[in-house]
Image (cartoon, coloured by chain):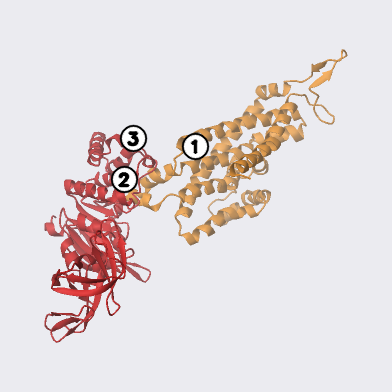
Amino acid sequence: MTAARFVSTTAWLPLGWMAVFLLLPVAILLRVSLSEPRFDQPPYTELFAIDETGHWVWEGSLQAWRWLFEDPTYRDALLGSLVMASLTTIACLLLSLPMAWAIARAPLAWRTALLLAVILPFWTSFLIRVYAWISLLKPEGLINTTLLGTGIIDTPLLILHTNAAVLIGMTYAYLPFMVLPLYATFVRIEDDLLQAAADLGATPWQTFLRISLPLAWPGVLAGCLLVFIPAMGDFVVPDLLGGPDNYMLGTALWNEFFRNADWPTASALALTMLLVLLAPLALLQRLQRRDEVPA
Amino acid sequence: MAVDAAEFLRIEGITRRFGSIHAVDAVSLDVARGDTLCLLGPSGCGKSTLLRTIAGLEVPDAGRILIDGEDVTGMPPHERPVNMMFQSYALFPHMSVTRNIAFGLERQRLPRALIRDRVDEMLALVSLTEFADRRPHQLSGGQRQRVALARALARHPRVLLLDEPLGALDRQLRERTRIELSAILERVGVTCVIVTHDQEEALTLADTIAVMQAGRVTQVGTPDAIYEHPVDRETAELFGSLNLFPASFRGGQLHCPALGFSIDAPAGQQGDASLAIRPERLAVLRDGEQRNQEITAIVERSDFLGASRLLLLRLDDQTGIRVLTDPGNRVEAGAEVRIGFDQDAIRVLPA
């Protein structure tokens, strides 16, 4: 098999993957979103029916989509998700920049150990780690007992089941997705460039802002998307750590599917979320093309 | 406080250790204002470490660096009045040529108009005006080298440091670039320290050469003084290949059995020595031609090198000799030739 043949053959793999696991489900979602819910199996109506004259007639409905735009609950959920995902992304970025920088500039022998420390939590189930946060954050949890014990506070802080708890949990959960791409770009920056900046009069902080950060820009973008996109649709963290005032897309989606058994609305919501997430992806594509620098 | 111009840059007993290795070992050197000092030595001799110490990128374990009387030893690199051209050039890949050159000036918070003028001046100096908006990856190796030079000169450093300035260029470009570099440095008149392992670079660019070996300075002098009178074999070998013959002092004379040759030696010299003759100072004698010193040898190889011909000869006692001769001198392997040389071509070095 020639190289060109091999490339054209292997190119079908990602395309096939996408067709089976993205396009097909999206098509199904679209189809379900155009029907109405019913108490039956399947729990949604047919799109077409055969009338008495033997013709196919359109039986579908735009009811689900209409609700999506009319009921403020969904708009609030979208807004809640946008705000929480943005805050999570910013928190991850601010924490990851010094972390990734320190790992990238650490002696070679240390780097593997430090990177491992970032990745190690993945060895444990995501769900268990979120549960662990409950016992850390709850009024009689480790954080509160420690603070009470040292006398810093005299009434327990109410963190669990607030937006703060969701932010803490999501930042914790997605931090590695920010650290790793940042590290990957930081570590490729040559020492010579940083020394040249210092030699030309730049303080370490100026060097970071003007040399390291711009050169790590692709990593910053990748990291932000890797955090923002799953954070937008996250259900587990808001459900376990969040409270009644916390309403996000993931929760709304779950409610429609399982609590209300309204598959059409849930499908319309899922499609909307997908469209909202396509925007930052398209943005990334554009920015990366602009920043492409041949080696 | 201005000091004697001959001590504009003072390197005083600089020592830099890496673990148990003395990368730079108690080196002291002075550079006069406007002069160019070349640190010449094989790789690993500590010349780059010494240069980086002057830039502040290495902190010495002992010693001081003074610039125009001011002790800069403890000063961080971004505060030092020196600028360095890195061997890799270290151009900022995300910035245009203009932004690269302006980078150091912007850190000085100079007025915009002044920065623009200075950048234009530097672009003109290195003949890159029409490439001002290019990124480094859009330039050739020689152009990048000039951007690096312009960037290092833009801040008008009191001392300019060049680390293997021609090291990353290919052979054809080197000579032309060396001549351009020499002209630019002369025009700017900046005090300069250049690190190189290339003897031609050192000979043509330097006012003074400091030869370094294993962290120490073994000889300091003008290019022709060092070339003509190297203090030891290692220094002599930095400037091209060398024929070495064992010799010994005996009864006020230096005797070399291989060449069958004795010369008067200064009184009191004892023990063994080496006689050194450069291949180009040996001549293949034609029939009837006479020199004051002659030996005969068998030709083992005769290699045409283009501009010259390298002969590998063997003496009766199996000592090998290299002779650089006229390329048209078609000596065949196996032939017996007479080799002549003048006594002043001989250098006496420690054994």
What residue sits right under mark 2 in the picture?
B142
- Provide residue A255's location: percent of width, then percent of height: 72, 34
What residue sits right under mark 1 in the picture?
A288
* The color chain B is rendered in: red
Q: How many marks?
A: 3
Q: Nearer the viewer, mark 1 or mark 3?
A: 3
Q: Residue at x 32, y 54 (%)?
A: B167
**What is the secondary structure assignment of the residue under circle 1?**
helix
What residue sits right under mark 3 in the picture?
B133
Direction from residue B289 to residue A70 in the image, left or right: right
Which chain is drawn using orange?
Answer: A
The image quadrant of residue B65 is: bottom left
| Residue type beneath disc 3 | Asp
The residue furthest bottom is B251
Direction from residue A103 to residue B180 in the image, left or right: left
- Provide residue A111's location: percent of width, then percent of height: 50, 57
Q: Residue at x 24, y 50 (%)?
A: B178
| Residue type beneath disc 2 | Gly
Instruction: Assess disc 3: are there few (<14), some (14-19) or many (≥20) residues with their C-alpha within 10 Å of its C-alpha.
Output: some
Disc with the residue nearer the chain's start (2 vs 3): 3
Q: Is residue B348 visible?
A: no
